[in-house]
Amino acid sequence: MRWHVSAPLSKDVTLTAPTSRATFWNTTMKVKSSIKSLKTRHAACQVVRRKGRVYVINKVDPRFKAKQG
C-alpha cells in the first residue's frame, strides 16, 4: 500500500492511507451473480478461474474487470 504525504518538506508530516484499493488503482471490479453477458462487452475479455472464483479480465482495458459472486 502506498501512503500519501499531506505536507511535503515540512517538519510535521502526516501520512494518510488511501481510502481504498479501488480508488487508488482508479478501476473498480464489477461483482455480478452471472458474468455471462460481461464476457462479451469487449473483444479482449477473458474468463478465468482463480481460487474457486470466476473472473472476467481484460489486459487491454482494465475497466472491464468483473467477478462472479
Image (cartoon, grey):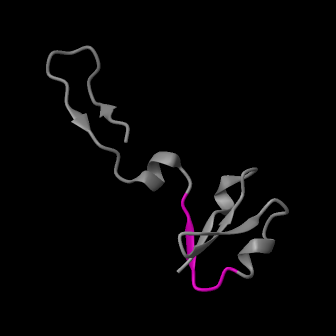
Which residue is at a point 72% across and 75% down the rendered structure image?
38
Which residue is at a point 75% across and 65% down the rendered structure image?
46
Magenta stretch: includes residue 19: no
Which SS does the magenta portion mostly show? loop
Residue situated furthest left in the rendering: 12
In the rendered view, tell whether residue 31 sits above or below residue 2.
below
In the rendered view, tell whether residue 6 sits above or below residue 1.
above
Q: Nearer the viewer, residue 6 or 44?
A: 44
Residue situated furthest bottom in the rendering: 33
Residue 58, located in which quarter of the rendered image?
A: bottom right
Measured from the top left, where is residue 13 in percent x and y? 19, 24
In the rendered view, tell whether residue 17 sits above or below residue 63.
above
Q: On the picture, is 5 further left or further right than 38?
A: left
Which residue is at a point 81% across and 73% down the rendered structure image?
40
Q: On the picture, is 60 further left or further right than 66?
A: right
Measured from the top left, where is residue 15 in percent x and y? 24, 34
- The quadrant of the rendering that contains the N terminus is top left
Highlighted magenta segment, given as a residue range: 28-35
Q: On the picture, is 13 further left or further right than 34?
A: left
Measured from the top left, where is residue 32 in percent x and y? 58, 80
Which residue is at a point 53% across and 49% down the rendered structure image?
26
In the rendered view, tell whether residue 28 sits above or below residue 66.
above
Residue situated furthest front in the rendering: 51
Magenta stretch: includes residue 30: yes
Residue situated furthest right in the rendering: 43
Q: Which of 35 and 19 is in front in this view?
A: 35
Count the marks: 0
Q: On the picture, is 47 further left or further right than 51?
A: right
Q: Which of 31 and 54 is in front in this view?
A: 54
